Amino acid sequence: MHRIYEGINFEHKSCVLGTMKIALVLTIFIATVIKPSDSSIGLVQATNYMEVSSKKVEFPLTILMTVFNDLGYQKTLLTELKAKFEGFKTMNGIKDMPDETKAGLILKVTAINELLSDTEKYATTVYGYKNTDIEAITSTSCAVQIKNNVDTDIFAAANFLTASIDVLGNAFTAEQLVNGSEQLSRVLNVLQDSYHHITTLNEKIIRYINDLESLTSGHMSPSVSAYVQQSRCVAESEMDHIKVLSCRKNIKGLVCDLEVEIYESSQKYLLYRAVNYDGVEITIPDEHILVKSPNNKYGLLMCRDEPVETVNDCIFTPWSHTSVLFSDDPVNALLLSNFSLSPPPLPVQTYDTGVLIMNSDVFIKSKTGTSTKDVENKSPMKIRFDQSTSIVTEIEQTVLEFKGGNSATNLEIELTVYNSTSIDLMHEKALKDALDNFDWVNIMKYFGLVVQVAVLPVAFTSCSLSVFALIKSILSYRKKQRKEKLENRYNLRRNYELNKRVAKKVRK
């Protein structure tokens, strides 16, 4: 393929582009009259609403994740507690129990001490989030302090469990610790309660470690975000966006500087997307979203490049071309718009619960209860349907089902305002734009096979004839391919239905 394009003399670019302009003029001249209606699909289609901030307050905030002071004392408490449980193995009565009964108790004691070892490991991890050589300095007027209470929780657990073991005592005999006895039940209850208590303690410490690790990774965990919401600087019930700027360790723990944005008010913008016509669609400026503002002005949104938020931070700017796009003259909109190559997207449900389909390879079915019915694909098209119906679409391995929400009693289908000649013009303009920008990667993707099969014999006869033949051959080839695909799908579907009916009769 690369060698074929090398054969075209692109030094004569003016000849190539001149021929493309002639092709455009010829296509415009032969185009039939387009009659739009209120239910017709044009170059763009409204798809969804987007909440955008209209008034925002920004300020810095410091958050302190406190860390306890004495790790050695916590380790001592845990070591003493493990020794207490280890003593169960040599407790009077237990050491003389039958091996099969004693084995179960020993396993429970071992499991508890493993949990206590984990507690020591988690406490050590938390203690690593402080630096005893750096004094604590608050750099902002808004500050939030989150206490971990790891040390007090370990102290409370050690006292509680030690008291439980002491109350149990060790005045048991092997004869008393038999299955079903009150004495054995007391021992088992202490071990079971201890296991549950230490598990709960570890889960609490792990949650705090997760908060610490989230902040040092530049993210806000839900629990930390909830603490920030309680700050005096954050208005109650307001939507916000919090960004972690940096974190550092000091003598009190982990200190992080945050940037907080409070969205005091927002507005809903109606989003539009370009309608795809068999791989070609209108060109919208990069990194912009075509929208209609709450006061019915059309323009573009440029949003901060971040994951979709409940409220988005965007800037609205007018776009002069919208006066053409949203006029009552679709022919003028077609002639004055630029087009580019773009793969057909998957079906999408729009804000009014309709389903927008822009790929002719999609199989469509309507489903009401247990009955289904094929829907002819006339992409681009929009299907609206009532609440008792759903639309099922399938392409390759992707199956999507859309629930109805329209009050209509039957399927309502909207089709494009543009006829086949107009769509051909879109493709020609997209090709011209590709030639203007020398985007040969897209060009080759678009008509590689056609050049070899249909155009090569005449490609070098003359500048005008080769380019014009190239365009017409591409369009003709694509139409032929689409027709063959539709016929093949129809035949396969018909054979499948016939076979299903025959099988049903045989079963009867």
Image (cartoon, rainbow, N blue to C red):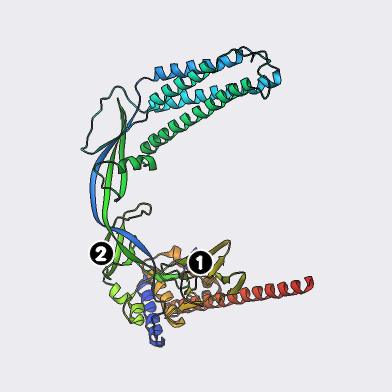
Label 2: state its secondary structure.
strand
Three-letter code, disc 1? Lys
Left or right: residue 343 versus residue 12 is right
Left or right: residue 178 versus residue 232 is right
Q: Which one is in front, 445 or 84?
A: 84
Marks 2 and 1: CB-CB under 8 Å?
no
Q: Relative to 20, does residue 75 appear above or below in the rendering?
A: above
Pick whichever of labels 2 and 1 is earlier in the sequence. 2
Q: Which one is in front, 455 or 116?
A: 116
Residue 431 visible to an observer of this rendering = yes
Looking at the rendered image, the disc whose residue lies closer to the viewer, 2 or 1, is: 1
Q: Relative to 83, does residue 503 appear above or below in the rendering?
A: below
Left or right: residue 137 versus residue 34 is left
Q: Residue at the location (36% across, 82% down)?
A: 331
Q: Which one is in front, 245 or 331?
A: 245
Residue corresponding to mark 2: 317
Which of the image's four quarters has the C terminus? bottom right
Three-letter code, disc 2? Thr
Residue corresponding to mark 1: 403
Q: Residue at the location (41% across, 33% down)?
A: 209
Question: Which disc number belongs to residue 184?
Answer: none
